[in-house]
Image (cartoon, grey):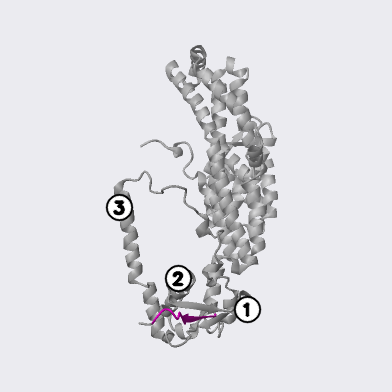
Amino acid sequence: MPAGVFSILPGNFFSVLASINKQHYAALLVLYYRLFQENSSGLERELVVREFTNYLALHHDTLADEDEEAEAAAEIAATGGIDAVKASEEKPAGDERTLAGKFLRRFIKTGWLGEEILADFSRVINITAWGRPFMKALADIEGGQKTEYESHVVTVYSMLCGETIKKDGHHAVLKAYEETRSLIDSLKVLSQSIKGFYDKLNAEAIRSNASSVLHEHYNLYMDEVLDKAYKRLKTSDNVSRYRIGIFKQAAKLLGDAQWLNESAEKYMRILQTSRDACREKLEFMLKEISDGLRAVDPLEDEIDRRNAAYSRSSTEIIKAYIEPDSTVAGKIGLLIKAVREDACPDGREAQLLIPHHLHRIRFLSPATLAFAQKRAEGNFVSGSSRADIEALFQTEKEFLERMQKRLSIKRIDAWLDAQGGIDRMLVPAELITDEESYIRFIYALLYGDSRNNFAYTIEEDDEKNAKTVRAADYLVPDIRFHRKRNEPGP
């Protein structure tokens, strides 16, 4: 079994970030890291304790009790030595100072920080080698650091196309490779982080209101995801301007055997391996730099696609708050309201709000979608095999047979005759009694509009006076069916 990460990190390294006061432990680590950056040497213990005390005094009300930590501190004090001296010195100083000492001791115990006693017996708190990258990550997250995408491309170009590549080519290639990977990784993270904001947006929509969704979109999402750096990357010409030069330089270096050998010899001092292995590594990194920059455009397209999807969802949610009936859910709710007798006894008020009605064929125009999608000129089956044509004709035949077995013109003629159409005019109120008769009525309406061989004609008012009537809870045009005089009954 490999040694793994915890062969370097203490086993309880992450315990402080999993405790009940994890937000305060994280804040204190960031506080120490800021002090570390401001000072050129180690931090005196008294300075660290004082800064921790100031923080805890401000946040004392939000601290949770840690009984286990108090017991651990008591055990440390009972062991004697330096820890016992520290515990005894800190206790009389007050609650916040005592807590500051406890927090500091736990950082030392878990491996985030270390303590050094100098020759003058002063005590200095140092950062551990493995603790620094984690503290930097915490500081970056807390500070909301923005990724500068453009700088990566500029750095790659300056490394490969500058003077450094001639004398210290291995360092230049290594740095250019790291910057390329950083650019690609940052764009991947940006693309994948949109999903988290999308899920959060849906949660906000459920428990909040339109103002919360607007805040989530424009104040948080736009600032943290599509920040100014990404906009600059999209609108600037740095990628296109520098990328061609990087491609040419990478290809030139790959074809320069002398440069590869000289750089590989220098690279041997870092990798402590053979020259051939170092040369292969340099060639690999140069190829990866070119491939990585080629992947920038697809990544940007994916980010734009995800952003468009997020923006559509955000707009729909906001629209749902402002105009509830405009969404699919709102329309379904409106339909339910229309058919509920207890909510709307006559159904008239709600149904009038429903924009979907039965339209006559004469209202269709060449601009209608069904007619707008015209076939290309010529035989649409040209070039198809005979088997394909026969299969198409067979499908059409089966379709026509099914139609004839269901509701053909003759069947609708016979149905209208059975309702008394031979002797009198027929109106929707007596024709429509249930769902099946409603469907037959629709077919009769369609045949009356489109077929000359239909036995009935349709009488209706002019367009200005056209109206609708209700028949068995269906809203239909107010029309009358007359049997044609030259069409004898059965």
Counting from the top left corner in percent of width and height, residue 404 is at 34, 69
Q: Does 21 sit left or right of 11 as displayed?
A: right
Q: In the image as oriented, which residue stretches furthest toward the front?
A: 486
Determine which residue is flagged by label 1: 465
Query: Looking at the image, which is closer to me, 302 or 11?
Result: 302
Q: Residues within 10 Å of mark 2 (few under 14, many from 20)?
A: few
Q: In the image as oriented, which residue stretches furthest toward the top?
A: 258
Above/below status of 298 relative to 179: below
Q: CA distance from mark 3 to mark 1?
A: 50 Å
Residue 112 among those drawn in magenta: no
Determine which residue is flagged by label 3: 390
Q: CA distance from mark 2 to mark 3?
A: 31 Å
Q: Residue at x 52, y 84 (%)?
A: 341
Q: Secondary structure at mark 1?
A: helix
Q: Amino acid at mark 2?
A: Asn
| Comparing labels 2 and 3, the label whose residue is closer to the camera | 2
Query: Looking at the image, which is closer to me, 111 or 430?
Result: 430
Counting from the top left corner in percent of width and height, residue 408 is at 37, 72
Q: Residue at x 61, y 31 (%)?
A: 240
Determine which residue is flagged by label 2: 452
Q: Residues within 10 Å of mark 3 (few under 14, many from 20)?
A: few
| Comparing labels 1 and 2, the label whose residue is closer to the camera | 2
Q: Amino acid at mark 1?
A: Asn
In the rendered structure, are the residues bearing label 1 and label 2 in contact, judged by CB atoms less than 8 Å apart?
no
Q: Which stretch appears magenta?
A: 478-488
Count of labels in the image: 3
> Which of pointers 2 and 3 lies earlier in the amino acid sequence?
3
Counting from the top left corner in percent of width and height, residue 144 is at 64, 45
Counting from the top left corner in percent of width and height, residue 254 is at 49, 19
